[in-house]
């Protein structure tokens, strides 16, 4: 998959959880003292105009609008709007057993993002479902700003060409339903993402 706006093949999909204190609290989680990092496979990627097919073993898939960051070939920072989908009921079962979140986070289509554009930070985020706004926030509320996250991930793991970073979601996450239409926007419309949720 070639990333729109970067023109390089997709690399690793890095994700940071609980990067907005209000979101951590809305799910009853502690506000972390260091970044919570997990990965998604390339098969989880979904581009604008695509269709999300919820897994049969989950009764609740939640949307989480995010800024997705990446480095262009010239080293400049690029951003895109993204949606990190989570099978919340599956995640709750895994967390109760102290197990990794992979089955809840890494399904096909669970890492959606729009085209990458030159970064302008801080940036506003919004997500609507069937025309009704569900999430609205600003990257100014991040616990770890974008540049700091990228530096942390690069120093700790090493970031490669085409790697993208989902940087966390503001509060307001909620479930999607079959037939829903999702519209996400970043930076006042600099990057947009449109998706449909398939009927079961």
Image: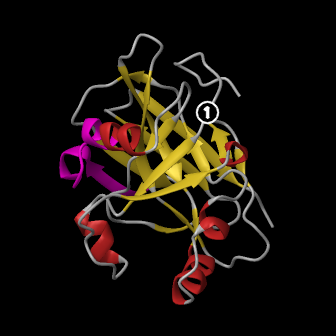
**Front position in the image: 11 or 178:** 11
Query: Residue at the spot x=53%, y=33% of the render?
Result: 163
Q: Residue furthest left?
A: 140
Q: Position of residue 111 (x, y in %)?
A: 59, 48
Which color scheme is applied? Answer: secondary structure
Instruction: Specify the segment rendered in magenta.
Output: 132-149
Pointer 1 local density, CA inside 10 Å: few below 14, some 14–19, many at least 20:
some
Query: Residue at the spot x=27%, y=35% of the render?
Result: 147
Query: Residue at the spot x=53%, y=84% of the render?
Result: 98
Residue 19 showing in the rendered view? yes
Is 116 on the left or on the right of 188, as rendered? right
Q: In the rendered image of this protein, does residue 35 appear above or below residue 177?
A: above
Is 166 on the left or on the right of 200, as rendered? left
**Front position in the image: 40 or 24:** 40
Residue 132 showing in the rendered view? no
Query: Residue at the spot x=45%, y=41% of the render?
Result: 165
Q: Position of residue 61 (x, y in %)?
A: 61, 69
| Label 1 sits on residue | 11
Image quadrant holding the N terminus, namely: top right
Q: Secondary structure at mark 1?
A: loop
Q: Position of residue 112 (x, y in %)?
A: 59, 44
Is 199 on the left or on the right of 40, as rendered? right
Q: In the rendered image of this protein, does residue 141 appear above or below residue 175?
A: above
Q: Position of residue 148 (x, y in %)?
A: 25, 40
**Front position in the image: 155 or 26:** 155
Image quadrant holding the C terminus, namely: bottom right
Is 59 on the left or on the right of 124, as rendered? right
Q: Is residue 37 magenta?
A: no
């Amino acid at each position: 998959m070639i990333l729109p706006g970067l023109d390089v093949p997709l690399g690793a999909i890095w994700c940071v959880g609980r990067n907005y204190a209000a979101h951590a609290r809305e799910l009853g989680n502690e506000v972390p003292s260091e970044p919570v990092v997990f990965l998604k496979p390339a098969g989880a990627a979904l581009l604008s105009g695509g269709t999300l097919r919820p897994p049969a073993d989950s009764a609740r898939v939640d949307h989480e609008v995010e800024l997705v960051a990446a480095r262009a070939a010239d080293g400049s920072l690029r951003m895109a709007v993204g949606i990190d989908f989570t099978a919340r009921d599956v995640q709750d079962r895994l967390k109760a057993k102290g197990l990794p979140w992979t089955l809840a986070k890494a399904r096909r289509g669970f890492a959606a993002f729009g085209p990458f554009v030159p970064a302008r930070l801080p940036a506003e985020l919004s997500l609507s479902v069937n025309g009704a706004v569900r999430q609205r926030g600003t990257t100014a509320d991040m616990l770890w700003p974008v540049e700091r996250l990228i530096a942390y991930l690069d120093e700790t793991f090493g970031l490669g060409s085409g790697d993208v970073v989902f940087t966390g979601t503001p509060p307001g996450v909620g479930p999607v339903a079959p037939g829903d239409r999702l519209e996400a926007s970043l930076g006042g419309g600099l990057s947009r993402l449109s998706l449909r949720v398939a009927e079961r």
